[in-house]
Amino acid sequence: EPEVTQTPSHQVTQMGQEVILRCVPISNHLYFYWYRQILGQKVEFLVSFYNNEISEKSEIFDDQFSVERPDGSNFTLKIRSTKLEDSAMYFCASTKDVDNEQFFGPGTRLTVL
Amino acid sequence: KQEVTQIPAALSVPEGENLVLNCSFTDSAIYNLQWFRQDPGKGLTSLLLIQSSQREQTSGRLNASLDKSSGRSTLYIAASQPGDSATYLCAVPGFGNTGKLIFGQGTTLQVKP
């Protein structure tokens, strides 16, 4: 059964460093999302992406964040200069259409020291 | 602004019990609601998607109901098993047509053998 995959599963970085989190959405899906979950807190929406552009971003998604779909399969989230408060689990999700079921990847645990 | 609340925050039941998890949302103008399961430190597994035109959706021992007018959904788990122990999250689409999901804080279920 098709699934969303994410790499790496765990990333440790120093404050101020750039990180790139990678996702491979389900192949026939058209809408892509990043969410994050700080330990013990709710899952929060970061950004949605459709037709090779951002369709919506949250207040969290500031100038330090960017997303890209560099080829037909990968979907990446870049954090330019990480902060301690960026430590969280980051989930990628995809769906065929906005009113369809969303499928989530296993997540990348980002730890900023 | 859409807000999602789940009650109770935690639940502990003996194996074999039937149980109900509750989800409420403040804005009833939704087109669907999705229930997820999250195991500790893991990703989100989609359990059920219930469209606004439906009142119920069933998958195995799980049954989800949706009452848009009252802003409520319930997830019924029949004959609970220790393997059902996890956190259960409900999510609804946020304002706008991008498909972003707004999550509740979850109900953590423990089923004791």
Image: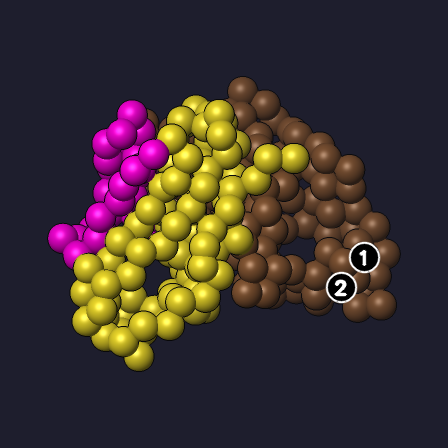
Chain colours: A yellow, B brown
From the viewer's side, name the closer residue of B30 and A70. Answer: A70
Quadrant in the picture for the C terminus of chain B = bottom right
Residue A64: x percent and y percent? 17, 57
Q: Earlier in the sequence, mark 1 or mark 2?
A: 1
Q: Which residues are magenta?
A: A44-71
- Up the image or down, B90 lies above or below A51; here it is below
In the picture, measured across the screen, residue A23 lies left or right of residue A4, that is: left
Q: Chain of mark 1?
A: B
Res A66 visible: yes
**Vertical comparison of A69 with B88: above or below:** above
Q: Are marks 1 and 2 on the same chain?
A: yes
Residue at the extreme bottom: A113
Q: Could you tell me how far apart the alpha carbons at marks 1 and 2 are, in whole angstroms?
A: 6 Å
Residue at image mark 2: B111
Please rate how many residues cluster around mark 1, counting C-alpha atoms within 10 Å: few if below 14, some from 14 to 19, many from 20: some
Residue A61 inside the magenta-drawn segment? yes
Tag shown at residue B81: 1
Horizontal and vertical percent position of residue B37? 60, 51
Of residue A76 and residue A58, the one placed in the foreground of this image is A76
Chain under label 2?
A: B
Q: Residue furthest top?
A: B53
Query: What residue sits 19% from the left and 59% below the top?
Result: A80
Which residue occupies the foreground of this view, B48 or B69?
A: B48
Left or right of B95 in this view: A66: left
Q: Amino acid at mark 1?
A: Gln
Residue A92 within the magenta-colored segment of the rendering? no
- Counting every numbered tag in the picture gives 2
Label of residue B65 in the image: none
| Cβ atoms at labels 1 and 2 below 8 Å apart | yes
